[in-house]
Amino acid sequence: MKKRSTSLDGVYLLQPTVFEDDRGGFSEFFKSSTFEDCGLPAFFVQDNFSVSHRGVVRGLHFQVPPFAQGKLVTCVRGAIYDVVVDLRPGSTTFGKWVSVELSENTFEALYVPEGFAHGFQALENQSRVFYKCTNVYSKAHEEGIIYNDPELDIGWPLPAAIVSSKDLELPSFERWKQKNQMDRVCGE
């Protein structure tokens, strides 16, 4: 497996070795010893799977401690435009984002550590996304930022045809920063 750095420290594009023959292709998506050798977490506790129509945007989602999650994301059918936003206070790339296209043709995966918001847009109908999480889902610790925030100015490739009502109610990046600062001041 090759681990390629992105412009956000700790976010990696992973390219597994693919073995191809007359039958098709095969690769190991996850092997704990390989992840350990690459300096990545090798312990995941929850797997998630979604199916999305072309244009659907899911995100930008994250969880806060003690239920913060790292994610290992891949697209097993179709294609997605995957976006990660740095939310780590004090980071030199705080508020910056990176995107990659994941598709069924590449076998690639994106590793997203704790401290980042994650979202994606389906580029094809019936795009299927599989991701492993380093922590379990906790509704009480779930947060997000609106996908079309003007300050982040994410370059989504398609008009957002479908966004959940829950995601449409997420705060702006500025509002989230203000709340986050207030929480630190108040000790919450």
Image (cartoon, helix red, strand yellow):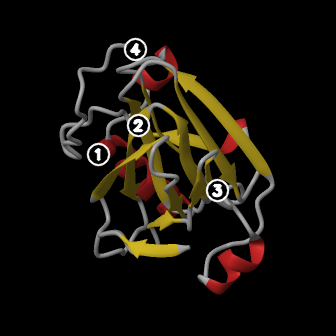
Image spot of residue 135 (x, y percent): 74, 55
Task: Select label 2 or label 1 by which is in front.
Answer: 2
Comes first in the chain, label 2 or label 4:
2
Mark 4 neighbour density, 10 Å: few (under 14) some (14–19) many (20 or more): some
Task: Select label 3 or label 2 by which is in front.
Answer: 2
Image spot of residue 169 (x, y percent): 43, 23
Residue 35, by quadrant, is bottom right
Residue located at (24% from left, 25% from top)? 158
Name above or below for residue 110 compared with residue 126: below
How far apart are labels 2 and 1 at the CA level? 26 Å
Task: Select label 2 or label 4 by which is in front.
Answer: 2
**Number of the label disc, if any, that sits on residue 162:** 4
Q: Disc 1 residue type?
A: Glu
Image spot of residue 53 (x, y percent): 45, 17
How far apart are labels 2 and 4 at the CA level? 14 Å
Location of mark 2 (residue): 80
Q: Of 106 and 61, which appears nearest the observer?
A: 106
Q: Secondary structure at mark 3?
A: loop
Decide if residue 137 is in sight here: no
Q: Are the residues flagged by discs 4 and 3 in contact, CB closer than 8 Å?
A: no
Location of mark 3 (residue): 69
Comes first in the chain, label 1 or label 4:
4
Q: Disc 3 residue type?
A: Gln
How far apart are labels 3 and 1 at the CA level? 22 Å
Q: Could you tell me which quadrant the C terminus lies in?
A: bottom right
Q: Secondary structure at mark 4?
A: loop
Q: Of 87 and 160, which appears nearest the observer?
A: 160
Q: Disc 2 residue type?
A: Ile
Location of mark 1 (residue): 174
Residue located at (61% from left, 29% from top)? 50
Residue 94, by quadrant, is bottom left
